[in-house]
Amino acid sequence: MNPTIVRLAVQALLGHRRFWLLLVFPIGLAALVVLIRVLTGDEVAAWDTLDGMGPSLVLPLLALIAASSVMGPEVDDGSIVYLLAKPISRHSVALSKYLVALAAVLAAGTLPILVVGLVVRPEEPGMSVALWTSTVVSGIVYTALFLALSTLTRHAVVFGLLYILIWEGTLGSIFSGIATLSVAQWGQRVGQEVDAAVSSSDLALWWALGASAALAVGAVWFAGDRLRSFSFQGDE
Amino acid sequence: MSVLRLEKVSRWFGNVVAVNDVTMTIGPGVTGLLGPNGAGKTTLMAMMSGFLAPSAGTVTLDDVPVWRNTEAYRVLGLVPEREISFGYLSGRQFVQANAELHQLPDPRAATERALARVEMTEPAERRIDTYSKGMRQRIKIAAALVHEPRVMLLDEPFNGVDPRQRMQLMDLLHRLGDAGSTIVFSSHILEEVERLARHIEVVVSGRHAASGDFGAIRRLMTDRPVRYFLRCDDARALATALVAQPAVKAVRFTGDDGIDVEVSDLGAFAHGLPRWAREGDIALWEVSPSDESLESVFSYLVAR
């Protein structure tokens, strides 16, 4: 980890207009859930909305925006050469950027989900903590995955969206087999350990934890390796 | 003292060959990489700075390949042509971030030294996106020399820089070169390269077209056949006088009073022409070079 890269990444994140999108999604979700709770008086329906859209839609979107904001623009326009023309490990560059994006995801993505959960179902805080735990786990993985994607292609946002909507969103709910390879489901499985009342998953805990850790570490390492081979006259 | 060595280096992108079998050795002093736009200068620079893998051949800095070699940046400074997108930082913040990334013992002092060298101390507090093109260029150079590299690569450093600042920058690079640094800069402007570089490498269409000191390149440029367009009051009489001269290779009439002349020895022609005209009592109205463009110089060097 390199404090200068971290500082620059924070400045890049805050200086970018995309950053404000980071806040729009969780605020929108919170407003929707609270609205359902107030209008219908049905706390289960409100909770289901939070549970259904939070971990598998809002969170990955946030991770995609955060990861592509700290990495994407600099890779696209090549100004990352100013960071890379230095005798510092590329893995430390990737890790520093990852930690900044992750901090943004945890703060802007998982915390609102926890707070909204507690507001909607105050009598069952365990469920909110469980949901929060599962979003922390999948947030860690999503951010790493999208960071790696940003170093791989200029169209990271497009591919990321396709992945979120098709793989995690549609296919994941149709075919149970995809659960084995779904980041959201891994998180869910871990959250289940906190409170069994949250929506459950049949995965083995060791698989959920192992796959999450392997993918997160592997993706950040891969991003670093891609930076080592960064070329400023792309083949694309 | 560092030496940058390119050994049979080629780079292609799909079917397009950007750099074709280039071998050159660049030592201390200022070297100019001269070539028209699209000649492959940026591709060469990218390979020299470790930001592009050669498709064939090797690029080494003091006998160590630069590709995927992070340590090379301890001795290497790079000023890319592209704009910095760190517009939200002030000039000082940007240079200091570079100093910190180099893990210098005193980044603050190194920053001030670098800013002073490019004369950017005064506007250093302003955000980079308020800078003029020339100021951005200078802040990029400050960032590249903050760790006092032995080798400095600059891609088109004088683009968009006003003449006064250009002189200052040239002066700076001159001093660095004299102090034993290896400075390479690319340019498509002959005068720039002539004024600054002690050694010149000419690249045309991805190929290494010529190499040598300022004098050798100048000779190549002046010895090439040059064409002139002349207008006078008696074209036939002047043509008769011209064909008698060994410096003249061909004469052709154009229009009523015009002559196209192809000249092999520019010096002898330039000296002789007024005399020949006076001796024949011919009034010269116009003498203009028809192919003085740099492109024609380059195409001559390639065909040679």
Image (tube, rainbow, N blue to C red):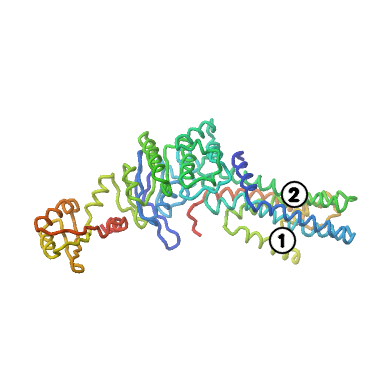
Location of mark 2 (residue): A136
Image position of A15 (left or right of A81): right
Q: Is residue A165 above or below residue B155?
A: below
Q: Is residue B304 above or below residue B176?
A: below
Of A219 and B152, the residue lying toward us: B152
The residue at the point 16 percent across, 60 percent down is B249
For label 1, the SS is helix
Q: Is residue A47 above or below residue B79?
A: below
Tag 2: amino acid? Val
Of B242 and B78, the residue lying toward us: B242
Per the model, the C-alpha gap separating discs 2 and 1 is 16 Å
Q: Classify 10 Å Cα crowding around label 1: few (below 14), some (14-19), many (20 and above).
A: many
Decide which of tag 2 and tag 1 comes sooner along the chain: 2
Location of mark 1 (residue): A168
> Badges 2 and 1: C-beta atoms under 8 Å apart?
no
Image position of A195 (left or right of B94): right
Q: Position of residue B235 (x, y in %)?
A: 15, 64
The picture quadrant where one finds residue B184 is: top left
In which chain is the residue bearing label 1?
A
Q: Classify 10 Å Cα crowding around label 2: few (below 14), some (14-19), many (20 and above).
A: many
Q: In the drawing, what numbered circle is on residue B10?
A: none
Of A132 and A49, the residue lying toward us: A49
